[in-house]
Image: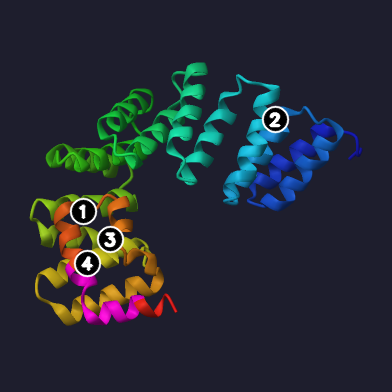
Amino acid sequence: MKPEYQEAWVNKGVCLLILGRYEEAIYAYDKALEIKPDFYEAWNSKGNCMLYLGRYEQGIYAFDKALKIKPDFYEAWNSKGNCMLYLGRYEQGIYAFDKALKIKPDFYEAWNSKGNCMLYLGRYEQGIYAFDKALEIKPDKNEAWGNKGIALSALERYEEAIAALEKSLEIKPDYEASINNLGLVKYEIGKIDEAIEHWQAVIEINNQFVEPKLAIGVALYNKGKISESLTIAEAALKLDKSWGNLQRLKKELWGEKLLADAAKLLENPQIKVLLSESKE
């Protein structure tokens, strides 16, 4: 490969990105950018590597470089928006997704991600609108159906939420998020045993998923099965102790009933000892 051939460096970077070898891909994109600093595709692809590596600020920098060269590059606006979403900068995320959608109104990914920003901001009706726009474009996307279900549940429109989550699972029966969230909804309407069944199904798919384990612990505690509850709750919290915080559970859109019952579990002396150990 000729060192000055920037297209070849970018193509190599693309192959490495597909293989998940992001650091090597970044090296290839940097080589291309040494030759051609205004190569916006290379900046965008480098940004995507940073996004996949969780280096969101560096991703934003790369996407901004691409957008300075090509302001109508809607993919870069969308990826920048995703970095903002993961950083919790939701208003800036919405701004970026809106820029992408102004250029390409039928961009499913931007509508879905904009909806997620609305969810985290508590703007559930606007979230539903965004998910509906996404589903007009791609009706067979389980993620958007699942996200719509979460928004409907937050508005206590439980039957509609169940319908949306079940639609998500018709498309992808092993979609962990929707199975888990179906459990959250069932708990709020008093179907605790069904909720537990959903959470157990998630754990069978992914034994490292903390949320359904903790939720089962809460449900069992509420049912008076204290010893069994504490065993599973401790196992969940040992995987990730940040879940032993009501603010975290609110952010994950746990319903009022489940939150109230979680508060009781988290006040148990055995759980409090476990959580205090994590802070030492």
Q: Secondary structure at mark 1?
A: helix
The three-letter code of the residue at mark 1 reads: Leu
In the rendered structure, the answer to whether residue 255 lies left or right of residue 63 reads left
- CA gap, disc 3 to disc 4? 16 Å
Residue at the disc numbered 4: 216
Label 1 Cα crowd, 10 Å radius (few <14 / some 14-19 / many 20+)? many
Q: Secondary structure at mark 3?
A: helix
Whichever of callouts 1 and 2 sits on the residue coming sooner in the sequence is: 2
Is there any visible trace of residue 135 in the rendered image?
Answer: yes
- CA gap, disc 1 to disc 3? 15 Å
Say which mark, if any, is on residue 246.
Answer: 3
Indicate the quadrant containing the N terminus: top left, top right, bottom left or bottom right.
top right
The mark closer to the camera, 3 or 4, is: 3
Residue at the disc numbered 2: 41
Q: Is residue 270 above or below residue 134?
A: below
The three-letter code of the residue at mark 2 reads: Glu
- CA gap, disc 1 to disc 4? 10 Å
| The magenta segment | 264-275
Indicate the quadrant containing the C terminus: top left, top right, bottom left or bottom right.
bottom left
Label 3 Cα crowd, 10 Å radius (few <14 / some 14-19 / many 20+)? some
